[in-house]
Image: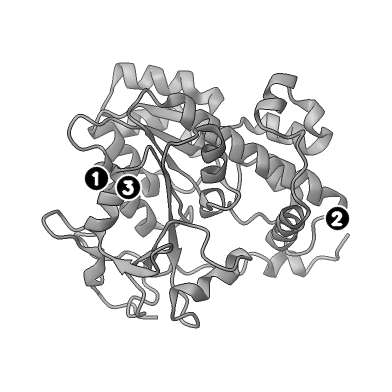
Amino acid sequence: MRTLLTAAALLFTTACSHAGAARPHPAATSQGSQSPMPGGWTSPLHREHPLTGRIWDVKAARFVDAEALRGALTQARFVVLGERHDQPDHHQLQAWLVQALATGDKKPALAFEMLDVGQQPAVDASLAQAPRDADALALAVNWAGSGWPDWALYRPVFAAGLEAGLPIVAANLPRSQVRDLVMRGPEALAPGLRQRLSLDTPLPEPVEQAMRQEQDEAHCGHLPKEMLGPMVQAQRARDAHLADRLSNADTGQGGVLITGNGHARTDRGVPAQLAARAHGKDVRAVGLLEVDPKLREPADYAASFGAQSLPFDYVWFTPAMPMEDPCAALLKRPKK
């Protein structure tokens, strides 16, 4: 989920060291296949961190290489690929994984958090006229006016899917529905949609409190307390809707979702929603995380998710991009 600076911003959006040239860590390459990062890393920070480029199998508590990850993901019916939205290396790795999962006759649906269901007709029309033209698709959905990071960052992922002939699925709730949900509550949604998204089912108290705290921190403590519950509802609704769209797009070939790391977490994000909807169908989630010079071991990163262990099946560590403190400007304002 993108970091949001004000409550109003969320209502109109979807969701949640060493600058020299460096090659990926050997764990980022795979035997018998092209390197995921043939041109090296784009992100300039912490390339020499001991975790950079390495892939952590959370359940097995061991490092694996890219080929082992590819093999594990190809066995899953659904794959959820997380990201920091404005991270170019994350999108390059996603593109490589999409290519790896679309081998042979397998054509999984490729769904995007960045597109909402209202844009599906524009997606379909673009694919019918120019099935391999990623830039035509960007124009069709008005990516430049969407509020998402620059198209050049996401283009490799879309291009990989189009080159493989994958169905492209607009998976998110429309912003108008997110806004109505936050402002008016679940009753703002049609009864069928509300039931499908399980919004009438209360969350366990520890989960509710953890999600409220996340919303408070994401808004730098400036979100009115009475808005925390509605924001949690919006997050739940998006998780469930993304899962619904991916599940419904499956024609027997499975599906891949491109989304933020917050939606990709296995404990309460899209993978958990998929597991509840697609009983017996294997779901795997990959978190793409930037390394932190203060955190040297994979387990050290669990605390940033408020969890005892990393809430993903696999974590692929990357160097970091510079980022301004999103709270600095907001904290200068008086708290209302």
Percent x, y of residue 21: 25, 74
Comparing marks 3 and 1, which lies closer to the viewer? 3
Q: x, y (%) of residue 216?
A: 75, 60
First along the sequence among labels 2 and 3: 3
Type of amino acid under label 2: Lys
Q: Secondary structure at mark 3?
A: helix
Q: CA distance from mark 3 to mark 1?
A: 9 Å
Pointer 3 local density, CA inside 10 Å: few below 14, some 14–19, many at least 20: many
Instruction: Using the rendered view, name the quadrant where residue 11 is placed.
Output: top right
Which comes sooner in the sequence, label 3 or label 1?
Answer: 3
| Residue at screen point 34% across, 49% down | 94
Q: Is residue 86 above or below residue 277?
A: below
Q: Position of residue 121 (x, y in %)?
A: 47, 18
In this picture, residue 91 sits left or right of residue 327: left
The residue identified by callout 3 is 73
Q: Nearer the viewer, residue 333 or 254?
A: 254
